[in-house]
Image (cartoon, rainbow, N blue to C red):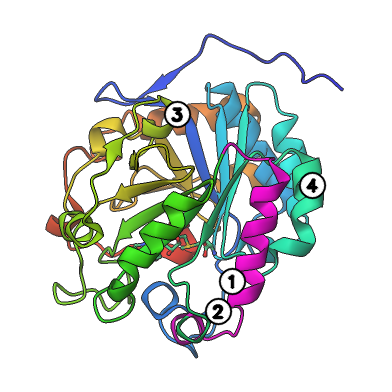
Amino acid sequence: MNKPNLKTDRTLTDINGRRLRYLRLSLTERCNLRCGYCYGSVDTPCNEPAGLTNPQIMRLVRAFAGLGFDKVRFTGGEVLLHGGIAELIEQTSATGGIAVVGITTNGLLLDKQLPRLIGAGLNRLNVSLDTLDSKRFQHITGVNGFERVFDAIQNAVKSRAFPRVKINTVIMRGVNDDEIGHLADWGLSNPIDLRFIEFMPTHRSGWGHARYVSEAEMKKTIGVPLEPVHDRAANRGPAITYRRGDSPGRISFISAVSRSFCGQCNRLRVTSQGQLVGCLFGDQRVDLRELVERNAPAKEIERVIVSAVRSPGFRREGLSTSVTSLKPRMRGLGG
Ligand code: SAM
């Protein structure tokens, strides 16, 4: 079936002239891993109030599409714990104007669901993996699941359903910094994009200068000369991407602490509780839940989004995370 042609000339820009077109929607705070730097600790319970229903989420997706958004990523928490994720992907990819539908997952439940998700229209996939060592994986995440995640990544690559499977790897001193070289080799020698993410000072992350490893230090450790990749797709987001010679793989750096990329930011976020967020490190929230719960018309939802985006301070400009004391809860916001 063809998508309804909802194409509009509408584009949403914020007060600093940044065009917004990418929605990151957190579906749940629940997670089946307990990475200390993200969730808190191994025994942190999750007492999440009920999130939005799928029809409510789709009302939001359609409103964003009406504002010219063409990319949606579902995240969390762990998206694959959300009931009806395949239906959400299917309906999102059938929404006029939406060209890109992605998920960020820890990969634990991916293998079983992958064919269904691809069939539903999933065309971008990010899997988080901080180590290539099975014992260390268990130490970091609290779960013995390395092989499951690794196999899922390999099968996702083989499926050829994604331009490039992206691997999200947070580097922390004393946890996995001794694997930087090995991870870079793996990233460069496989048709993937391994993204080294600087450890950020988020809620209950245990962040400290002693555990933080900068992009500059990671590059020094990798040692080999890297060539920047100049294609537009690789450089649209906060990552800076490199290859080595004609390596099949790429590695990227997402360096929110050492390098501000606010100027290129094209995204808005919605939390699992339906709060609109203009910036990962922003302190303002606008409630969209009330609107979808009372079945407000798309135009009204659009108006609320536009007015939020145009209000001063909703989207920050030029602030690096190292100078803010705000500590976002990654699992509700979806990293
Ligand atoms: N469950 C999914 C997953 O594991 O990918 C999505 C949620 S997780 C919050 C999204 C990403 O945020 C993961 O790649 C995770 O490593 C990253 N993340 C969490 N806390 C972080 C921190 N303090 N600094 C940098 N990245 C972080």
Report the Cα–Cα distance between label 1 and label 4: 19 Å
Residue sitting at x 35%, y 32%: 229
Q: Amino acid at mark 2?
A: Cys
Residue 145 lies in magenta, yes or no? Answer: yes
Taking depth in this image into account, of 300 and 242 the one nearest to the observer is: 242
* Residue 180: quadrant of the picture: bottom left
Report the Cα–Cα distance between label 3 and label 1: 31 Å
Q: Amino acid at mark 3?
A: Ala
Report the Cα–Cα distance between label 3 and label 2: 36 Å
What residue is pinned by disc 1?
30
Disc 2 packing (10 Å; few <14; some 14–19; many ≥20): few
Tag nearer the camera, 3 or 1: 3
Q: Is mark 3 within 8 Å of ligand 1?
A: no
Q: Amino acid at mark 4?
A: Glu
Q: Which callout, 1 or 4, points at the residue further toward the start of the chain?
A: 1
Tag nearer the camera, 2 or 4: 4
Task: Tell me where residue 246 appears, x and y as whole percent.
Answer: 41, 37
Magenta segment range?
A: 137-163
Q: Which callout, 2 or 4, points at the residue further toward the start of the chain?
A: 2
Q: Which callout, 3 or 1, points at the residue further toward the start of the chain?
A: 1
Q: Are marks 2 and 1 in contact (CB under 8 Å)?
A: yes
Task: Tell me where residue 41 appears, x and y as whole percent.
Answer: 42, 85
* Residue 72: quadrant of the picture: top right
What residue is pinned by disc 2?
46
What residue is pinned by disc 4?
87
Q: In which quadrant will I find the N terminus?
A: top right
Is residue 38 found left or right of 300 in the rendered image? left
Disc 3 is placed on an element classified as helix
Is residue 130 found left or right of 152 in the rendered image? left
Disc 1 packing (10 Å; few <14; some 14–19; many ≥20): many
How many numbered marks, from 0 up? 4
